[in-house]
Structure formats: structure tokens, C-alpha cells
Amino acid sequence: MDKLDLQLMSYVPQLKLKKEGAIDYIWDPLRKKYLVLQPEEFVRQLLIIYFKEVHGIPFIRMSSEYLIPLFKTQKRCDLLIFDPNGNVLLLAECKSFKEKKLNLTIDQIQNYNLYLDAPRLLITNGPDCLYFERSEGRGFETSGIISF
């Protein structure tokens, strides 16, 4: 499987971080609040900046921690990108930069996509990304470039 390098780490200087006592926080521009800094949250915030800076997607067309019903439970997908009409364009799952086996997340993102039906899927741990686009009649295929 081909990996895609979005160079997410180059956006680290744009993150808004703060420390209160022994706890580090990171600003989420989508939820408009500081969150406890966790490795997965760090990657999600880099991805949000990437989509805004590289693809010009406004924050209003992104949603993090989106709640979906799945197999009689409630799950939260990490990041959704919507088109101007409110249709899901991309479903992204973020993992800790320590997570090296991104292909293990494929089942998780496919299950989420049963509900969302996104035409593009992205799995990232920061340095590495797996990106898939729906192809006519052939399901999802890996792609070397993100396009909208």
C-alpha cells in the first residue's frame, strides 16, 4: 500500500498550545476551545491546519469528533470534510504518531463509512498517511494525491 506524505509536521509552528500547571493544552479551531493535548489530538489539529492551508477548506466545512450511530452504539470519527452543500467529502481517522500500523485502522474507517458514505478516506499518524478514493465500480483505491 502506498503511503502519502502530507508533511503535517511542517504545520507544528501554527498550533496554539498552552500549559496550565502540569497539563498541556491544544487549541481546536473547530470546537473553539482548548483540549488536553493527547498524541491523537495533536495529529488531528495538524490535519485541520493542512486542509485549511493547502486545500483552502474553511473551518465551517470541517467537523471533529463527529458522532455517528454504528452497530447499536455511538462512535466518534476524528475529522470530516464537507462540500459546500453539506455532503461528506472526506472521512479522516487520526492515530498517535507512535502508531506505526495504519493498515489496522482500515476496518475501523470502513465501518464508520458504512454510515457516512464518504468518497474519500484518510488515515494518518502525522508522518504517514493512507489515502483512498472511491473508483467507479471498483470500490476504494489508494491514491498518491489528495484532490477535491
Image (tube, grey):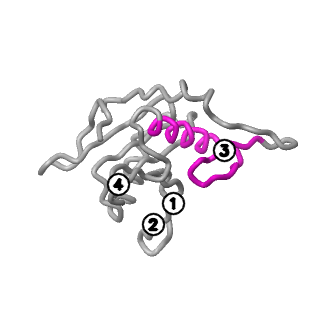
**x and y percentages locating residue 91 in the rendered image:** 39, 51
**x and y percentages locating residue 33 in the rendered image:** 68, 52
Q: How far, Cα to Cα, is label 3 from label 4?
A: 25 Å
> Residue at 26% across / 44% down in the picture?
133
Q: Are marks 1 and 4 in contact (CB under 8 Å)?
A: no
- First in sequence: mark 3 or mark 4? 3
Q: Are marks 1 and 2 in contact (CB under 8 Å)?
A: yes
User: What's the residue type where badge 4 is placed?
Assistant: Pro
Q: How far, Cα to Cα, is label 1 from label 2?
A: 6 Å
Q: Nearer the viewer, residue 118 or 61?
A: 61
- First in sequence: mark 1 or mark 2? 2
User: What's the residue type where badge 3 is placed?
Assistant: Trp
Q: How far, Cα to Cα, is label 4 from label 2?
A: 21 Å
Residue corresponding to mark 4: 84
Q: Is residue 117 magenta-colored?
A: no
**x and y percentages locating residue 137 in the rendered image:** 12, 51
Residue corresponding to mark 2: 68
Callout 2 secondary element: strand
Residue corresponding to mark 3: 27
Residue corresponding to mark 1: 76
Q: How far, Cα to Cα, is label 1 from label 4?
A: 22 Å
- First in sequence: mark 3 or mark 2? 3
Q: Residues within 10 Å of mark 2 (few under 14, many from 20)?
A: some
Location of residue 105 with respect to 43 vertically, above or below: below
- First in sequence: mark 1 or mark 4? 1
